[in-house]
Amino acid sequence: MDIKIRLSVEGEPVKEAIVQIEDYKFEELTEEERESAIEIVVRNWADRHIQIEWEAPNA
């Protein structure tokens, strides 16, 4: 299974990626379990690829 991930900032596409998962890993999952597994994969991808920095002067 290929999961296409598209990251946008202010509506503008910034990055696209395709994450591949072996189909057999989804064979015995219910639809709800499959959706949860895909969400975990996408969140893990985001954790590895998105970095946000900020500074609070005089805080």
Image: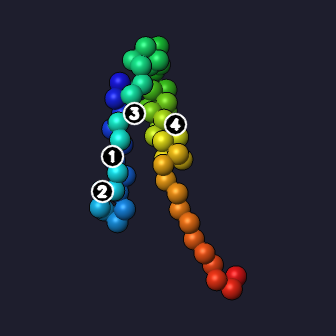
Q: Position of residue 21 (x, y in %)?
A: 42, 25
Asked if residue 23 lies left or right of residue 29, the reply is: left
Q: Position of residue 52 (x, y in %)?
A: 53, 62
Name the residue at 33% across, 46% down. Answer: 16
- Is tag 1's residue or tag 4's residue first in the polypeptide sequence? 1
Mark 1 or mark 4, whichever is nearer to me: 1
Residue on which the image places disc 1: 16
- Image quadrant containing the C terminus: bottom right
Residue on which the image places disc 2: 13
Name the residue at 39% across, 17% down. Answer: 23
Residue 43 makes an appearance in the image: no
- Is tag 3's residue or tag 2's residue first in the polypeptide sequence? 2
Asked which secondary structure carries label 3, the reply is strand
Whether the residues at callouts 3 and 2 have beta carbons within 8 Å, the answer is: no
Mark 2 or mark 4, whichever is nearer to me: 2
Whether the residues at callouts 1 and 2 have beta carbons within 8 Å, the answer is: yes
Residue on which the image places disc 3: 19
What is the three-letter code of the residue carrying label 3?
A: Val
Q: How is the image coloured?
A: rainbow
